[in-house]
Image (spheres, coloured by chain):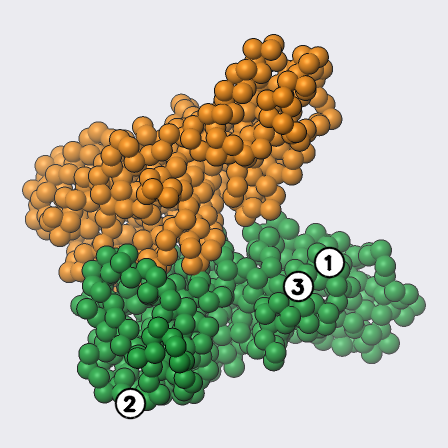
Chain colours: A orange, B green
Amino acid sequence: MVEIAVMGYGTVGSGVVEVLARHADSIAKRAKEQIGIKYILDLRDFPGSPFEDRFTKSFETILGDPEVRIVVEVMGGLHPAYDYVKKCLENGKSVVTSNKELVAAKGAELLKIAQKNNLNFLFEASVGGGIPIIRPISQCLAANEVVGIAGILNGTTNFILTKMIREKKGFDETLALAQKLGYAERDPSADIKGYDACRKICILASLAYGKHVYPEQVHTEGITNITLRDVEYAAVWGGVVKLIGMVKRTPDKKVQIIVCPMFVSHESQLATVDDVFNGIMVRGDSTGDVVFYGKGAGKLPTASAVVADVIDCVKHFKARKYLYWDDGSPDYVEDYRENEVGMFVCVKAKADTEERVEQLFGKVDYLIRRDAEPGEMAFLVPVMKEKVISEKLARLSETGAEILNTIRIGDL
Amino acid sequence: MVEIAVMGYGTVGSGVVEVLARHADSIAKRAKEQIGIKYILDLRDFPGSPFEDRFTKSFETILGDPEVRIVVEVMGGLHPAYDYVKKCLENGKSVVTSNKELVAAKGAELLKIAQKNNLNFLFEASVGGGIPIIRPISQCLAANEVVGIAGILNGTTNFILTKMIREKKGFDETLALAQKLGYAERDPSADIKGYDACRKICILASLAYGKHVYPEQVHTEGITNITLRDVEYAAVWGGVVKLIGMVKRTPDKKVQIIVCPMFVSHESQLATVDDVFNGIMVRGDSTGDVVFYGKGAGKLPTASAVVADVIDCVKHFKARKYLYWDDGSPDYVEDYRENEVGMFVCVKAKADTEERVEQLFGKVDYLIRRDAEPGEMAFLVPVMKEKVISEKLARLSETGAEILNTIRIGDL
């Protein structure tokens, strides 16, 4: 029997307890040990719960109990999760977490403590919910150089964009619907501003290239500026607007990494990843593109990924799982303005704007939509450095043309 | 330094040697050991090869060398691969293989020998080429009951069907093109008759449900009967024709398993798996649908999956990887005629055929295509047992209507 503790009895935590109870026999068979839940840490009371006798409000009780060998952290947030996890690892307990904020901010440090103490620190559930992605990147793709990773990493924003595309509804109206359906939180900023996707691409980038990328190093744009107009232009162009998290290796061993809405061609496998689903494309030099697709969040998908890590942990008490990456550094992430990219641009034009555009960018392709407003003009800037595009658009602005929006063209 | 031997220097074998050489440093870092290729077994000579000194024609040399701890079997075919692999496992050598024919026919037996001798027998590359699928099913989905698996498992047939759909070319013409491009072999029967897909779904079914399913237990239809007419009807219906391998659990712990062309709705994630790509959908009771997508074959994708297994094997010399399933039994696979399924039926009708159809099946939906031949009639049989459909169609035949084709409707 291996005793574990579950810290946090919210959506994911209660799911973990449910999955462990429901599949107890098959889990024991796979783990080669019974897994017992000795404690559940939560500040709230759950009278009448079948697990009532396991609840505790004291982290110290868990920390001080040598029988507890694995601690599942599903509280979310950075504090006190970070302190608790660190103390567990320093006191001989392996940790399994679904907490992307924690891993994105403190992964390198916690992995180092785990390695020093010959423990596991596992976090499959932190990216992609129930979609296996951490393990495939670290193991199956071990014989590849990862050329790049691009993904639709946030279900809430993908639901909103899908609704806007399919039902021609505006952003605010669709956000309200997502909140009503429980797909968006009352304070939706972590999702719609791209922070959640940013944490996830940081974790994937750190794992794939062995060096920590911190969220604050990543240029992050959300979807709050995306309008029905943009969605219609994407359709005219031959694709859809998706919130993409993306990382690539540069020749000098740095990374290009960004989170932003992009035009995604109908040809791309990511274009059909709709609703609350996530899709993650890993480009390997040997495998080519491999895509992982599924529900990126939700109680049971996330809980089952946590439990799979617990099983793996039990099976590997002796041979530690080799997840590891180094600390990051300030110069590791290339300035995104140095990235080469194509750009969709929509402007409110003056009489001479077309002429000015061609002076600045040469010959460009124009997009025409049916319900365009008077003076509205949309064109595609060919691939060049972002900072050059910005400079040229600033000069276009000076001629009186108003830039309504710009959206990067994904090469996915 | 861990010494290995590679048996077979064909497409995959030369790829394995290439990947091990090209990524030697990063592989050593991940495996925590240098990996050396001591022998390459092939009956042919490769003068001038940079690995010329490693070639041997003698399996006994490999078997008798105690330094060789891992043997990579990439010869393909059942004989002599089966004897060689068995002898290796009986003599203390772990085995990594890409040989789906071997695993589908002898998996349970070889896994048992491996377990008895505390060795690894790994075969990630046997299904889906470079797509990680064996490991995700066995590990990440450990906390799920697998409700079912459905996949496009053969790139050659998927290429042919995609071309037929997109370019409105017939089967024979498209097969010839696939052969010219190297996507189909000179003798394409293993692909187009569905045998290759059958071996792969057998491996996935055995792994997911813990009991061996043998290829000869699986009703297998290829794509040789699929015509442009069928493809056009699928489009009218709202989907595409795909060769699907599929397995489901029955309530009495048996399996339903089949390989056949199916109508796949445009709503399904598998509908957009085109060209030589494979896509595998795993439905878990907790995760929901998870889809894995990528190139299912090819030298480097397959080789990189083999090398990933080698790395995993090196890392787990002490803690054996727990892949395991039991021997099969004759009554384990349900008779496919007992499966409930919807069916597309195309007939050459007589004057009274519509009336007869409705007498037999009740009200059915008809499909109309633009270039239908005189008398051609297509309709959709609602979900019922296959054997009932067959009996009713036999009676329809007796009335003089000629059954041109029947294709199952996938619920994917």
- Using the numbered discs, state the Cα–Cα distance from disc 1 to disc 3 in whole angstroms: 10 Å
The 10 Å Cα crowd at callout 2, few under 14, some 14 to 19, many 20 or more, is few
Looking at the rendered image, the disc whose residue lies closer to the viewer, 2 or 1, is 2
Mark 2 or 1, nearer chain start: 2
Vertical arrangement, residue A64 with respect to residue A29, above or below: above
Q: Identify the subunit bearing mark 2.
A: B
| Left or right of A287 on screen, residue B33 | left
The 10 Å Cα crowd at callout 1, few under 14, some 14 to 19, many 20 or more, is few
- Residue at the extreme right: B351
Amino acid, disc 2: Glu
| Left or right of A172 on screen, residue A70 | left
Q: Which residue is mark 2?
A: B60
Q: Which residue is mark 1?
A: B167
Q: Quadrant of residue B119?
A: bottom left
The 10 Å Cα crowd at callout 3, few under 14, some 14 to 19, many 20 or more, is many
Do the residues at pointers 1 and 3 share their chain? yes
Tell me which residue sits at (79%, 57%) in the image.
B367
Q: Quadrant of residue A98?
A: top left
Kind of element beneath mark 1: helix
Tell me which residue sits at (10%, 37%) in the image.
A60
- Using the numbered discs, state the Cα–Cα distance from disc 3 to disc 2 in whole angstroms: 44 Å
Disc assigned to residue B161? 3
- Using the numbered discs, state the Cα–Cα distance from disc 2 to disc 1 in whole angstroms: 52 Å
Verify CB contact (< 8 Å) between mark 3 and mark 2. no
Is B190 or A18 nearer to us in this picture? B190
Mark 3 or 2, nearer chain start: 2
Q: Position of residue B120 (x, y in %)?
A: 27, 72
Amino acid, disc 1: Glu
Amino acid, disc 3: Leu
Q: Identify the subunit bearing mark 1.
A: B
Mark 1 or 3, nearer chain start: 3
Tell me which residue sits at (35%, 39%) in the image.
A255
